[in-house]
Image: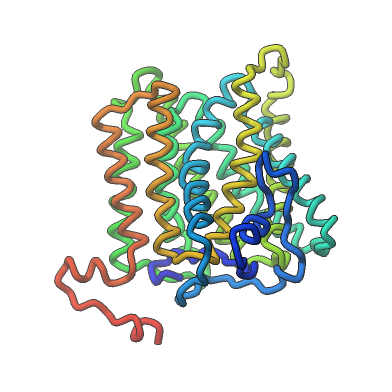
Amino acid sequence: DTGLGVPRPVAPDIGQPANLKDALASLPFLPPPFPYIFIPAPSRLTQIEYRMSTESPPPAPRAMLYAAFLAVYIIWGSTYLAIRVAVETLPPFLMAATRFLFAGLLMFALLRVRRLPMPTRSQWLAALVSGNLLLVGGNGLVVWAEQTVPSGRAALVIATTPVWFAILEWLRPGGRRPKLQAVIGIAIGFIGVILLINPATTSTAPTANSMRILAVVAATAAWAAGSLYSKHSTKPASPWMSVAIQMIAGGAGLLLVGLCMGESQAIHVSRFSAHSLYALAYLIVFGSWIAFSAYVWLLKHTTPAKLSTYAYVNPVIAVFLGWMFLHEPLNPRTILAAAVILAGVIIITLPSGIIDIFLRRPAIAPSAVDS
């Protein structure tokens, strides 16, 4: 825990690569031109650490660090653009179901080939809850909203996810009350969201668009809830297996929602554009496999402060790509909202005691907090 009610990410013990070749091999999935798919052996995934270590991370090849950060920054930032392009001609929930079922089932099959143990019944049930919160609530609502909401604006709302982490961590049984620093960040983050939801920021159908932005807000809360539930639930020892069964469970939930909403009746394959199909393939290969693999690798080989910068960079990348490729509007109010939201997120994720300095209050020493 950061001391602000925001949980630390999970860091799997995947071993220390000796060189760039071994580092590349430690990633479970690689895009072409690499002809093979690499998955760490089970023996390297037996010990899982559920908090970021405060010790210095082990050294890693500089080129690999740069490549991993670029993957997390650019690929995750570009998924909002890819979603926007995919839902132009593909039904949103069935598109998302295809993405996660394909990625999850293939990952699960390859992990079983490498003789990782089959998840238990309780682990499947936990994945059913967390997978549906994360992917049906978290991703599904975003995909549905991006039928009309610009991809950059959706990414800015998603940037408030740490706000919901702090709130839900406080509300859950046995949770910790957020400190003044987190409360200030939460308030600032919500002000930024209000600026985005304001009907004056939409050129057409303001009420409908505002409702879809609210759906993205609900998606951030669902993602935080799913993450917190996953943190405290039973999971397979392998983080890759945990993600695979969550994608399978969430993909099944998305499929059910799509069928219940009648999306199957509106499918006309002849209307599917090549751009939408390419975007779906990009989401599967790069969004669900490559970027996640890079993120897990960085959990082991960089500091929490450096890794957390993706939360600030992703929205900027998304806004820029949406403006460049889809000609999404970038008005002064959107820029102001972006600055306010990012300021709130930065305040929440800063080390404890920073706000005390600005308020001229004596900061509590870390040793005293830890004790």
Q: How many marks are shown on the rendered structure?
A: 0
Q: Decide if residue 170 is in sight here.
A: no
Residue 84 screen position, x and y as percent = 52, 28
Residue 304 screen position, x and y as percent = 44, 65
Query: Position of 208 compared to 362: left or right?
Result: right
Query: Position of 55 compared to 365: left or right?
Result: right
Q: Quadrant of residue 259?
A: top right
Task: Residue at 66%, 13% (x, y): give it.
Answer: 271
**Vertical relation: 330 (above or below) 360:** above
Residue 187 screen position, x and y as percent = 30, 53
42 and 193: which one is in front? 42
Q: Decide if residue 200 is in sight here.
A: yes
Q: Quadrant of residue 273?
A: top right
Residue 353 screen position, x and y as percent = 27, 72
Which residue reaches farthest top?
A: 270
The colour scheme used here is: rainbow
**Vertical relation: 236 (above or below) 331:** below
